[in-house]
Image (tube, rainbow, N blue to C red):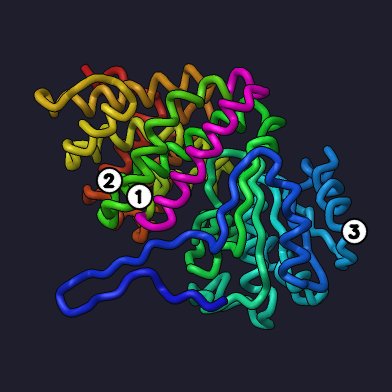
Amino acid sequence: MEKKQATMKTGNISVTDFRSPDILRFGQGAFTSIKEEVERLKVKKVCIVSDKGLEKVGLVEKVIDLLNPTGVAITTFTELEGEPTFQLVEKASRKVLEEQCDLVIGIGGGSALDVAKTSAALGDKQNLHPYLFEGQAIESRKIHCILLPTTSGTGSEVTMNAIFGDEAAGIKRGIVSPVLLPDIAIIDPELTISCPPKVTAASGVDAFTHAIESYISVNATSLTKIYAEKAMKLFPQYITKAVHNGKDIEARSGMSWVSVLAGVTLANAGVGAVHALAYPLGGTYHIEHGVANALLMPFVFNVIGKTCVDEMVDVASFLELGDFSNKRYLALDAVVDYLFNLLGELNLPTSLKELGVTEESLPILAEQASKVDRLLANTPYQLSEDKILTIYQNAYYGRVGELLK
């Protein structure tokens, strides 16, 4: 299951691979096919990784009931509450190693899936410290991995990324490796029906963030843009219905497609400044990742959108905001206005002040965000620490309306 890195140089030509899970299964009722996959893989012991909430509502037990007829041994790791830390994923990986599991099944939101796929990649390794705390790349994975999302947004089931909080540093950091792609991603929209409105909204806008950031990414390709474009076109059709009428299975299916498509383009083109500025908010204030991305998006794009005018014309068209082909420089205002108004429509916060962020902490947040080099380098705008601070200040007061005048 060794997977090599995704890009290489051949002379003066840059060659880019396109990656996704070995199997991507989508459809209502697809959840039950997990039994057949466990039988096909001929594994001996499974570790189910999930969170306490899903354990409480019986979803973990439902997975166990599905697998019991196979005769496979089963253990669980459900210690997730809130967003995970490196210390927690270390604990999960130790359990996979000690229990000698040869399959990890992750079921839940992005946090559970990130822990699941990382513990599968690290569950055969004795010394975890270099991978978790020293930046060493995870070279290979020997343990099978199946992921089943219960939210539509993170796209973790189809990405090479996993994000965790670093308690010692007070920030979030990412692990990136092709081996974090699962063997099988099973996307069943029925699993998302019980997702509450706030989580549906935050995770849904998070998926849109993946699509729009990867569309303007310096690493975008014609293929990644196809996925991003489709995700952005579907998003306005389904996000409001999914948030305000969660039992609408058509809307849930639509948002599941948005999440998958945006996740695939994220995995291959990467995201940028919105995520870079969101990381310190999660690390310092424990603001949910999707909420942070949703709030920051209009303020970040108000700045960086100036360097990708053509793409903003495209995005305005995808969102059916109008044809700006003959008035290109007005497209950015239309997109930013849409993104800000979306927050109110989905009952999401419209300022950092609402989230308990203090004005005095903004310079510290800006300093931390300015060091997220991997993501900032993927953005077609060189954001200085001062410019990042200005973005945070505008987001603190929710000043998009003033910026658009």
Q: Which residue is mark 2?
A: 216
Residue at image position (62%, 65%) is 118
What amino acid is found at the position of numbered circle 3 in the picture?
Pro
- Marking on residue 257: none
Residue 266 lies, with reference to residue 402, above or below; the image says below
* Crowding near the residue tagged with mark 2, few <14, some 14–19, many ≥20 C-alpha atoms within 10 Å: many
What segment carries the magenta color?
243-269
- Quarter of the picture containing the C terminus is top left
Tell how many labels: 3
Residue nearer the viewer, 371 or 303 = 303
Residue nearer the viewer, 188 or 243 = 188
SS type, badge 3: helix
- Marking on residue 272: 1
What amino acid is found at the position of numbered circle 2 in the picture?
Ile
Residue at image position (24%, 40%) is 304
Question: Badges 1 and 2: C-beta atoms under 8 Å apart?
Answer: yes
Judged by depth in the image, the label closer to the viewer, 2 or 3, is: 3
Residue at image position (59%, 30%) is 252
Mark 3 or mark 1, which has the lower sequence index? 3
Magenta stretch contains residue 258:
yes
- Quarter of the picture containing the N terminus is bottom right
Mark 2 or mark 3, which has the lower sequence index? 3
